[in-house]
Image (cartoon, rainbow, N blue to C red):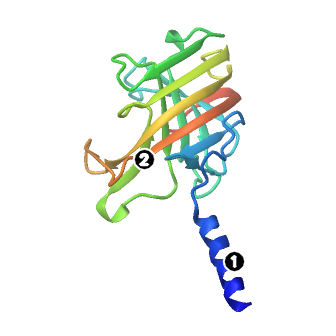
């Protein structure tokens, strides 16, 4: 009897360790996979920002939607950042950009709370502008000014992970390729001025 019980426990343990393949419903809002397995983080409500490219010296602006992480994130700088150029988007149409685009107008980034190599000065980052990354989205409402409304959805994004060197512009490859895929990131918010 004891042998049968131990065998049952061993089988259950092995089953629990198996990859969670095919379990992610990509039709749900804010569905995510990391290297094909379900990925979950808690996020706050989407925020929209406008910031000057070179503060005080430029008439160029950066527009982005931030999906901030809820933990270890007092300044709302960690999370998913969807950057775009309003003058290169058409409201109501699906738009897409990939890492190879010379003049990109859509990019998605992920700045996680953990996974960095702080002792080496390396910050983990994921980007649709790296390797074979890509992003597909639609804007339903876009009023690109402070107080203007922005509504839409990022249908899909493939973000490739790498390390940024805090000492310079160098990129350090991770030991293995990390691919974060995002599905149905919806947003409906109002632009404010970015603090960064």
Instruction: From the viewer's perspective, tell me whether residue 102 is left or right of residue 73.
Output: left
Image quadrant of residue 54? Answer: top left
What crowding class fits label 2: few (fewer than 14 Cα within 10 Å), some (14-19), or many (20 or more)? some
- Is residue 81 shown above or below 99? below
Q: Which residue is mark 2?
A: 178
Residue 176 in picture, x, y percent from top left: 35, 52
Q: Residue, x 56% and y 49% (percent of image)? A: 37
- Is residue 73 shown above or below 161? below
Total residue callouts: 2
Cα separation, mark 1 vs mark 2, equals 34 Å
- Numbered disc 2: secondary structure: loop
In this view, the residue farthest toward the bottom is 2
Residue 159 in picture, x, y percent from top left: 46, 37
Instruction: From the viewer's perspective, tell me whether residue 70 is left or right of residue 57.
Output: right
- Relative to the observer, which residue lies in front, 97 or 142? 97
- Relative to the observer, which residue lies in front, 45 or 158? 158
- Is residue 143 shown above or below 129? above
Residue 175 in picture, x, y percent from top left: 32, 55
Residue 180 in picture, x, y percent from top left: 50, 42
Asked if labels 2 and 1 touch by Cβ distance under 8 angstroms, the answer is: no
Q: Quadrant of the N terminus?
A: bottom right
Q: Residue, x 54% and y 15% (percent of image)? A: 95
Q: Which residue is mark 1?
A: 8
Which badge, 1 or 2, comes first in the chain's sequence?
1
Image quadrant of residue 169? Answer: top left
Q: Residue, x 51% and y 10% (percent of image)? A: 87
What crowding class fits label 1: few (fewer than 14 Cα within 10 Å), some (14-19), or many (20 or more)? few
Circle number at residue 92? none
- Numbered disc 1: secondary structure: helix
């Amino acid at each position: 009897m004891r042998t049968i019980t131990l065998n049952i426990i061993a089988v259950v343990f092995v089953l629990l360790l198996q990859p969670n393949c095919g379990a992610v419903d990509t039709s749900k809002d804010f569905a995510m996979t990391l290297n094909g397995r379900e990925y979950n983080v808690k996020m706050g409500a989407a925020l929209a920002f406008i910031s000057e490219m070179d503060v005080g010296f430029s008439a160029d602006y950066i527009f982005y939607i931030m999906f901030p992480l809820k933990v270890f994130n007092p300044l709302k700088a960690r999370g998913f950042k969807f950057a775009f150029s309003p003058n290169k988007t058409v409201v109501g149409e699906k738009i897409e950009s990939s890492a190879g685009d010379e003049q990109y107008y859509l990019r998605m980034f992920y700045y996680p709370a953990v996974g960095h190599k702080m002792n080496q000065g390396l910050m983990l980052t994921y980007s649709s502008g790296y390797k074979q990354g890509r992003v597909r989205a639609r804007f339903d409402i876009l009023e690109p000014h402070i107080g203007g409304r922005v509504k839409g959805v990022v249908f899909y994004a493939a973000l490739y992970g790498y390390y940024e060197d805090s000492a310079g512009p160098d990129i350090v490859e991770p030991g293995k390729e990390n691919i974060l895929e995002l599905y149905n990131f919806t947003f409906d918010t109002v632009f404010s001025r970015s603090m960064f």
